[in-house]
């Protein structure tokens, strides 16, 4: 039995399938691949897909760039970023919105934990120095 220990149950094999498909995809094929990856259960990490030259080529097309931007949003942004830039991005399906909301919660929790750790160190130095 294999236990998935990656964040949010992310599955490297699920992402790997999209990376392999991206090697031969172009234009509309890449945009469809991005849509599927953003909706796929178990795919929560998108850096490898973003690094693919075929995916990066979408930046050169005004109609396809929004899908590259959506992929970057899922990799580095939050749901608030989506709402702020909604007019520049493709419409998200319900599963895609839910996934972005989950990723946002993880991002906020991570930032909160980092802040708590910084505060703990600072408070300790106040009382013991």
Image (cartoon, rainbow, N blue to C red):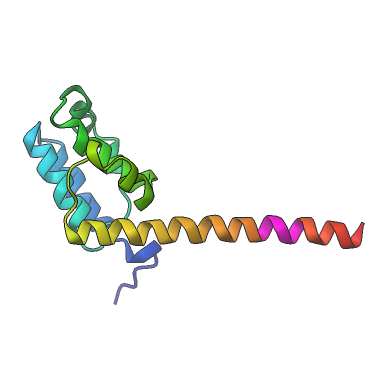
Position of the C terminus, as image quadrant, is bottom right
Residue 47 can be seen, yes or no: no
Residue 104 horizontal/vertical position (percent)? 39, 56
* Residue at horizontal 27 percent and vertical 37 percent from the top: 69
Residue 95 sits in which quadrant? bottom left
User: x%, y% of residue 97?
Assistant: 25, 57
**Depicted 54 relative to depicted 116: above or below:** above
Give the image location of residue 63, x and y in percent: 13, 30
The residue depicted at 56 percent of the width and 59 percent of the height is 112
- Kindly indicate the quadrant of the structure image that contains residue 27: top left
Residue 15 shown in magenta = no
- Whether 31 is drawn above or below 113: the answer is above
The segment highlighted magenta reads 117-121
Given residues 107 and 27, the one toward you in this image is 107
Left or right for 1, reference 36: right
Outermost residue to the left: 28
The residue sitting at the top extreme is 60
Res. 87 visible in picture: yes
In the image shown, does 23 or 99 lie closer to the viewer?
A: 99
**Main secondary-structure element of the magenta-colored stretch:** helix
Residue sitting at x 32%, y 43%: 73
């Amino acid at each position: 039995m294999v236990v998935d220990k990656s964040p949010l149950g992310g599955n490297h094999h699920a992402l790997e399938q999209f990376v392999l498909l991206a090697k031969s995809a172009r234009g509309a094929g890449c945009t469809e691949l991005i849509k599927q990856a953003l909706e796929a259960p178990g795919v929560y990490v998108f850096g490898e897909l973003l690094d693919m030259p075929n995916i990066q080529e979408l930046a050169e097309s005004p109609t396809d760039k929004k899908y590259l931007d959506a992929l970057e949003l899922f990799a580095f942004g939050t749901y608030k970023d989506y709402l702020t830039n909604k007019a520049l991005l493709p419409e998200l399906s319900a599963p895609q919105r839910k996934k972005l909301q989950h990723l946002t919660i993880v991002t906020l929790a991570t930032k909160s934990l980092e802040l708590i750790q910084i505060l703990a160190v600072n408070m300790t130095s106040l009382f013991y120095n």
